[in-house]
Amino acid sequence: MNGDDLKAIGYAEGKVIRMVLDIIENNYASQEKEEVLNLFKQVVLHPEQFLDHAVLKHIAQTLIEDTQGAETDRIPLKETGINYAVFGADYIEAGAVKQMEIAMKLPVAVAGALMPDAHQGYGLPIGGVLATKNAIIPYGVGVDIGCRMALSIYDIPAEYFLANEAMYKRELIAWTSFGAGNGWNGKDRAAHAVLDDAAFNMTPFIKNLQDKAAHQLGSSGGGNHFVEFGIIEFKTDDVKLNIKKGTYVALLTHSGSRGFGATVAGNYTRLAKEICKLPNEAANLAYLDMNRAEGQEYWLAMNLAGDYASACHEIIHERLTKAIGGQILAKVENHHNFAWKEMLNGEEVIVHRKGATPAAEGVMGIIPGSMTAPGFLVRGKGEAAAIHSASHGAGRQMSRTQAIKNISKEEMRKILKDHGVTLIGAGLDEAPMAYKNIERVMAAQKQLVDVVATFTPKLVRMAADGSRED
DNA sequence: ATGTCC
């Protein structure tokens, strides 16, 4: 018996679920699960009939109060949402647009934009950019706080990589760790100043996550996270990066703040939902006031998770650079799933970029395609209508379940072979066909970014298929 | 996204 069982029979998110689980443990533990669920289904459907019940009266009362409160205490959305720009509307699913429209009706919303890789998420869509006044939305940032891309360009010609791929593969396997719960142990544990950040002492909740953060430092995640070697091509000299026209070996990583950030996100989303009761369709957009303790606390925790995610990439790049023996010509790093204080029309706003890349004028970013499609090193153009943002990748065109159902292992093998890509790990849910065409996504954001160089993946590692790997 | 468990 757990919270999901109760939600399935009609219990709403909140404290009542905790109360019911307690009561079940203390009073109904010996009874059949089905029988207990039937009883509690009656309670949630007709709480008024249980107001005199010796054990269940408190739950009945709470359910009735919640229902009454639901109608009176909710913060109303505005009737008309603020207008926002959509880039690449033809490739964006209806659910993502619907979510953005709800977000634009929030009383704290100031401006928004939808990026061409947008798809439905919790609360704010992935690919959604939202500027708010004095408010931070934990689900506007996302679960993987500070998730990012990091690129190291080496002074190593492409031919050298192709002739030494076995060495790169060996080192890639040796120095990366993927999957939920995984990290580094014993002498392989990574060290970084971020673990001594005073923000870890902010609250007991954050302090309790410090050990997990230490264990997972320098590891990658699951899902679409990867560490890959590939070839980056500059078609012209880039003066600002001081890189000459040509092809170079490069290391590209995509991952975030691991279990630490996920736990922070979950905690403050729950807190926001308790404090900020919005109509049901906007419940996941619950926000924290930046002028109150909870908002300030989340802000510091979010920034710590961002610094932690950055440290993870730094360690992966340091270890692999040492292993392959390369000299770094340039490094680029950019994050999404984060919120920034920025100026908009003369006032300070909180810009949430959930799966969107910062693209202020001259700001560099990396927009990956898929394991067989090119990724792009870009320079932002500072488009105001996009709130200085761009997409964070190609975006999915198939859900994970759809991809597993519709793509065969043979198709996967073939597309990897055709593109000369070696893959370690990953399931069919990460197959290239599950993603939108990156060329079209880039075409839809010509106003937002200029392409500086093109990255072609050659050797890709992701989390093992389906579950954790050790 | 995450050892999903309130």
Image (tube, coloured by chain):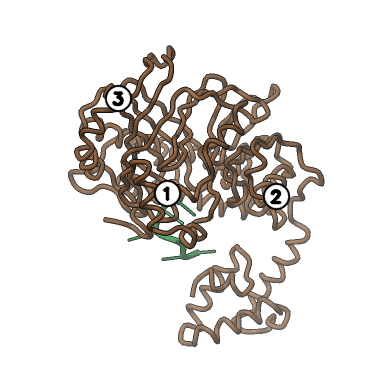
Chain colours: A brown, B green
Same-chain check, marks 1 and 3: yes
Q: Chain of mark 3?
A: A
Kindly identify which residue carries mark 1.
A204
Q: Is residue A340 above or below residue A93?
A: above
Amino acid type at image mark 3: Tyr
Q: Amino acid at mark 2?
A: Lys
- For label 1, the crowd category at 10 Å Cα-Cα, with few meaning under 14, some 14 to 19 and many 20 or more, is few
- Identity of the residue furthest to the right in this view: A79
Q: Residues within 10 Å of mark 3 (few under 14, many from 20)?
A: many
Can you tell which mark lies on residue A154?
Answer: 3
Q: Secondary structure at mark 2?
A: helix
Q: Give the mark nearer the N terminus: 1 vs 3.
A: 3
Quarter of the figure with residue A228? top left
Q: Residue at x 25, y 35 (%)?
A: A320
**Residue located beneath label 2 in the image:** A98
Q: Looking at the image, is mark 2 or mark 3 nearer the viewer?
A: 3
Task: Please give the name of the residue rendered at 60% of the width and 50% of the height, measured from the top-left corner.
Answer: A120
**Residue A47: mark in rendering:** none
Q: Residue at x 45, y 40 (%)?
A: A147
Nearer-the-camera pick, A126 or A133? A126
